[in-house]
Image (spheres, grey):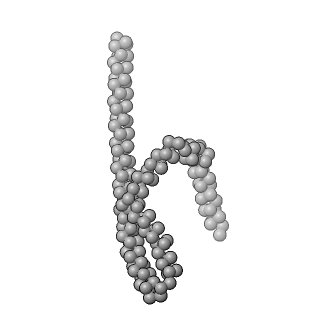
Amino acid sequence: MGSFFGKSVDENFKRNQEFMLQLQRLQLERQIHMRNQLRERKQALQIAKSRELFYWIGTFYVLAAGSTLFAFQRTKKPAILSTLLPLTFVFLYQGDLAYGSKLQRIHSEAENILQFEEHLLHLPFGPPNFESIEEGRQEQQDEESLTKAHDIFL
């Protein structure tokens, strides 16, 4: 009789473990999808932000170029045109970022870094662990209690 209940309990335990494993897997997949969607939305916002900035820089560039060319026509001094050079670089860079292949080049460079230069990504003192986090929390708590004690005597 004892072995019958033991087998039943063992079977229920194994089924429960498998069920919990499936739930954990499902939860992890959902978290991965959610984080990926959040990342995509943030990236879309960043692209939209760079495009909006490009419009503003473009407007400024057109106004600055027009006034610079007008000034050059009046004075005939070629040095006036030199002010367009840095503005041209900024304008072209922002245009490449907003509408060109700059993001693709950034992504490929990031992949190269992850693949061939992984040593550059290591955190100093390694990844945080429970002990280091707890030590920092304790230090902050001690400082707060000292500050409170100091404020009492003032």
Side (left or right) of 87 relative to 38: right
Q: Quadrant of residue 15?
A: top left
Say which quadrant the N terminus sits in.
top left
Tally of marks:
0
Q: Residue at x 53, y 42 (%)?
A: 116
Q: Residue at x 34, y 35 (%)?
A: 23
Residue sitting nearer the eye, 84 or 30: 84
Say which quadrant the C terminus sits in.
bottom right
From this viewpoint, which residue is outermost toward the bottom? 74
Could you tell me residue 89's position as x and y percent?
A: 47, 67
Side (left or right) of 128 relative to 72: right
Q: Residue at x 36, y 67 (%)?
A: 52
Could you tell me residue 79's position as x and y percent?
A: 52, 80
Residue 103 appearing in the image:
yes
Residue sitting nearer the eye, 41 or 57: 57
Side (left or right) of 24 relative to 144: left
Could you tell me residue 60's position as x and y percent?
A: 40, 76
Could you tell me residue 66's position as x and y percent?
A: 39, 80
Residue sitting nearer the eye, 87 or 22: 87
Q: Is residue 96 above or below residue 58?
A: above
Q: Residue at x 44, y 88 (%)?
A: 74
Residue 49 appearing in the image:
no
Residue sitting nearer the eye, 142 or 61: 61
